[in-house]
Image: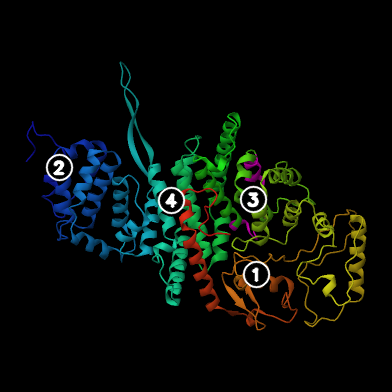
Amino acid sequence: MPPRSNTKLGAKWQLDAALLSRPVDLTALVSLSQTSPDDFYEDDTLSRMVKLLLNAESDKKADKDTRLDVLTILSNLAASSEGKRRDDIREALDNVNDFMEQYLEKESSGSEPELHKLMLLLLARCFEYSIKTEDLLELCRGDRALGLETVVGLLEDGETYTTELRRKQAPAMGRMGQWEHRLVCHRHETPLVLQLCRLVRGFTLPQSYFAAGEKLLEKDIASFNDEMNLLLEITLKSRLVEKLSLACYEGLFAVSDDDLKEDEHRSIACVHSFLQNMYFYATSKTEVYRRHLLCDTPLIQRLVLPYLERGAAQAASLQCHADSYGRGDFKKRQSVKPLAAGVSASLRTLVVASFRAPPTRTVVALLKRLNPTAALLEAPSFVAAHDRIFALLLLLNANMGALELGREAESKDENPHELLHGLARVYQMIDGDARERVRRIVKESGALPVARDTPSFAAVLQMLNDGASQRQLEYVRGSPGARSPLAPSDSDDDGATAEPEYSTRAEAKADSLRRQRDAKEAKPRSLLGDLPSLERRRPEVEDDDDYVEPALEVYRARPSDDVPPEFRCAINGHLLKEPARTPQGLVFERATIKLWLETRGSVCPLTGEALTLDDLIDDRDLRARIVSWQLAKTQKTLATSVSAAHGDEDDLYDF
């Protein structure tokens, strides 16, 4: 029977009509929640939907689609309301009974957590985007994999397309009206995207796994490793990094050029904290993950570089304002701390992703051309006031090979001499104690992967030492006189003579060619036998250029008190992630020693004895001790994490 002429077809009437069907169909109410949300607050419609449908125990009355419609209606209303009306929605949610919680638990075994996605969306909007990871884990009954999949699914739903009918031309005298269908894109609001950025970080924090002061057992550490490996697998499979990057770009950088706010800086830092902790704590597929960050996702193009560009401009503006009023206390100013935390976190991600990056990759070439160092150096006082940011810039340029003074720039945007000069100028502005911290981080850092076998790193050392030794100068120029620090010194060589020094590069070139001819005429016998050459066979061409490319060797980091020596790789000094022990008792990072054996031959880099991949044994006990040490160190620095927006002590994973 049609409604009477004086009956308003509001939310109450449509709900009463829908309750007559089995199962209840709320499609009309979903549309009404977008067009006329005020109708839902005029009576008890909200509480009736929760009590009669969301809590219904009969699937014949309210199936899964019905419950999804109820959550969709409530989330639509929460997005368009505030104040008293949001209180009404929260009051209606208080009526959710235990059956609905059991229904959610039963749905967690399915393939797509649709109910969890909408419940998270509703809670985030109702509580003004202040949901914590602990709340999400409580919703998912402690299932971290389900929680991360819920965030991934919500990000996937953040960009939907609908067709709307819009008037193109209004009717007039002698002219017909025209209407057309248009494709409209609907995106999640920016506060919701920032909420999701903060949520993902909690999945990798130790306090979400262990209580404060809890003694870590071996089984607990093994369980933690398994959880992190599972989360890494979900991250790679679901392309979570790509979804986060695009969502942040659309919400923060594509629509406005304004300075970022404190909450936005903190959310960006949380994204990078998630990415870095995933790399630090996972024990499998870490090399795949590192390449995934650089080459398989738009992370660099859509998140890191746009943020650093915006952050550099904001830092320059703050410095200009401070200089105008004669204030240079950057570290003490509250507005600078979130910016410094975001910049530092972004640079750490770049350092991790750029390590051993193939120079032929398009992203690597783009990163060199759009090197954020020059933009950040436009605010020298800001960089000098934050020594960690300066140290990260040095490590980044060493990994990218951006300071190779012996090579010509591939484009006009690349100028290694100018870049090194700018870094040296800022280095002179840093205080004495901060300078020592910079030198310690660059020379002794084992937490971050650093390419210490490059001319760029030698140039960095030259700048930090306020001058270079003859061997470092030859290394930067490309002289073959530079030897590996792994080789014994002259005093320990039992009478062996030192390498000759060359006055010009032309002499070095001539001596290098002479050595090559002598090596071909009298090749020494090798313990490995006559191995086939891996180099391409090509005719020799006399080169008139006096530049000589040095044969790079592996540079080990100096011993540091921050990382115990037994936790470091014996080659490059990096903190071990997948320790592999040799029959002689030496411990190497598996990926590092594998690369050595593939490129240098089946010889131990330290003892010179024969060594193959089959001789390496995975040291699981050492890995467990390293993880235990990492967790203890992380808990100590938790009070000064990025959540507090401390720009100078923002590392959850310290150097």
- Kindly report the distance in space between the C-alpha atoms of the residues bearing marks 1 and 3: 31 Å
> Which mark, by number, is residue 563?
none
The dot on residue 434 is 3
Q: In the image, is 510 to the left or to the right of 381?
A: right
Contact between marks 2 and 1 (CB within 8 A): the answer is no
In front of the other: 516 or 214: 214
**Residue depicted at 62% across the width and 42% down the height:** 376
The residue carrying pointer 1 sits among few (fewer than 14), some (14 to 19) or many (20 or more) residues within 10 Å by Cα, namely some
Residue type beneath disc 2: Gln
Residue 421 horizontal/vertical position (percent) = 74, 44
Question: Which residue position holds label 4?
Answer: 197
**Mark number displayed over residue 14:** 2
Q: Position of residue 106 (x, y in %)?
A: 26, 65
Q: Amino acid at mark 1?
A: Thr
Q: Amino acid at mark 3?
A: Ala
Secondary structure, mark 4, is: helix
Q: Is label 2 or label 3 in front?
A: 3
Instruction: Give the extent of the magenta segment.
Output: 352-377
Q: Earlier in the sequence, mark 2 or mark 3?
A: 2
